[in-house]
Image (cartoon, rainbow, N blue to C red):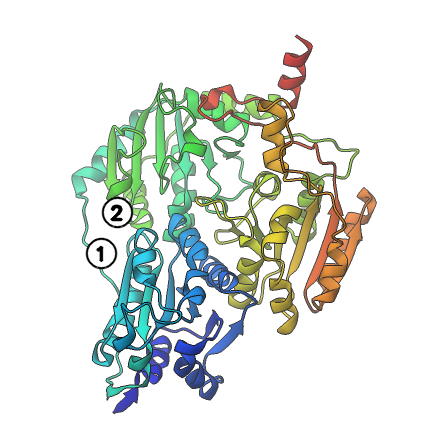
Amino acid sequence: MQLTGAQIVLECLKEQGVDTVFGYPGGTILNVYDELYKQQDQIFHILTSHEQGAAHAADGYARATGKVGVCLATSGPGSTNLVTGIATAYMDSVPIVAITCNVNLPLLGKDSFQEVDIAGITMPITKHGYIVKDVKQLADTIRKAFNIARSGRPGPVIVDITKDVTANKCDYKPAKEEDYEEELLYTADDIKQAVKMIEHSKRPFIYVGGGAVISGAEEELLTFAERIQAPVCDTLMGKGAFNGHHSLYTGMIGMHGTKTSNFGVSECDLLITLGARFSDRVIGNAKTFAKKAKILQIDVDAAEINKNIRTDFSIVGDLKEVLSLINDKLTQQSHTEWINHIKEYEKSFPLNYDKKALTCPYVIETLDKLTDGEAIVCTDVGQHQMWAAQYYKYKHPRSFLTSGGLGTMGYGLGAAIGAKMGRPDKIVVNVAGDGCFRMNMNELATASRYNIPIIEIVINNQVLGMVRQWQTLFYDKHYSNTVLKDKVDYCKVAEGLGCMAIRVTKKDEVEPALKKAINAKGPVLIDIAVDPDEKVFPMVPAGASISEAFDAKDLAGKERA
């Protein structure tokens, strides 16, 4: 049958199981939006307040559901406004397809109005990019884009389509969504070698990254950890892959990881790295990282093997499959002495904060209690992000959405909208600092327009908290451009954008405010005033060994000395 390019775009989206998209219209993409209007009963479109919000919403949808997220934008500034969101998804291996439209083919390369080479601009931050100049190639290109986005190590793909292609017609043949089969890069001998290393270990430690979430390996991971009786730490991206309430769980590793995890990894004799890439915020000083241990790394991306840390053995493959094969070969291990040693660290170095004051950790712990750890928690970037990672006990994968690799301020609100659209059964909360909230607070208008019941918690310390913490500790308290104290009233902003707003200034107001927000039928902002000098601990200075993690008690002792 003969269809226009715009009709083909929508047919291909439906082929891929897409029911929700996020975007913002403009001149070159009008044909697609006209078709969306005609098929609005089949594909629901969320009009965001800014294209960056659309990219983050597609990202949040993808992380929360495991599906490919989709965002749409017009040419020129419409497409370039997607760039930060695309880069965010790329750094955290999130499958999104960004569909943009460009000027008519005869106008390409002539500096035409709102013309930009978005495929070229995004080349370093996408798995692949296409520009479609022939309507006959459109369907196959979109299908390829989805396959690439979701296969192997997932990531964003951009499809840029000239406007005339969306109007032109060609024959269209429906196709079913295809399963992408990965070529196995490991052998049975590789599995045997991994098992041998594990069974010879006396002090194993498991380090879990975002690959465990992406792979859906939570059941295999639980079996594996209990089979070898090893402590488990995670990264920001790995939250929820291993139940935060499990007795073997030791908390996050790295710059703001627990002392238990950092000290344990520094003392283990085998570090089993599952779907993690040894980022600088995890390993600290690469020369001293886990120097007593052999390194076993399992990852789907061969490029991550030996990139930051040299391994003793590695397996390239899907983590869920590889762990399943390893579990079948493993005998039950016992490391009672090692586990007891780690438990002593947990008793000696618990996470701690001022229990008398109104603090972000108290807010997060209260949220955890009221939601029984079942909410989807999104964050922006900074101190509140670390506290959300430390004090909420994630039971399930895809329940902690945060910009780990790029560190994008303003990410969380759009992501929360996308997550709630993908998982309407879940309570969805975004925890933001006041500095981050200013970045994309216009997306509250999106939440109110569609009456999306998300909770926006603004940890309002009137400073750029994490930067101020560094300025306090390492820059002689030179608070250069980090003080936000001004006349902005976030409750009035939220109400002006159509949302309920609650102000919290006392500790005993936190629980009633959260309960009210949880039971609300629409979007709610909670503005919580906290001390500007509250700090995230433990902390590892940049470039230091993770064994040098210090907390408030250590800092006070050093200052006294």
Residue depicted at x 17% and y 43%: 187
Furthest residue in direction bottom, as rendered: 1
On the image, the x and y values in percent for residue 406 come to 45, 45
Residues tagged 2 and 1 counted as in contact (Cβ below 8 A):
yes
On the image, the x and y values in percent for residue 472 come to: 63, 26
Q: Amino acid at mark 2?
A: Gly
Could one spot residue 229 in this view of the protein? no
Q: Percent x, y for residue 494?
A: 71, 61
Please state if 171 lies on the left or on the right of 434 as rendered: left
Relative placement, left or right, of 295 versus 421 is: left
What is the crowding at mark 2: few (fewer than 14 residues within 10 Å), some, or many (at least 20)?
many
Q: Quadrant of residue 460?
A: top right
Task: Please state, as top left, top right, bottom left or bottom right, where the C terminus lies in the image.
Answer: top right
As drawn, the label of residue 182 is: 1
Give the answer, above or below, for where 413 lies relative to 409.
Answer: below
Q: Is residue 445 above or below residue 346?
A: below
Q: Position of residue 410 (x, y in %)?
A: 56, 52
The residue that mark 2 highlights is 317
Toward the top, the furthest residue is 561
Sooner in the amino-acid sequence: mark 2 or mark 1: 1
Q: Secondary structure at mark 2?
A: loop
3D distance between C-alphas at marks 2 and 1: 9 Å
Q: Quarter-wise, where is residue 167 in the image?
A: bottom left
Q: Nearer the viewer, residue 108 or 6?
A: 108
Q: Which quadrant would the N terminus be assigned to in this image? A: bottom left
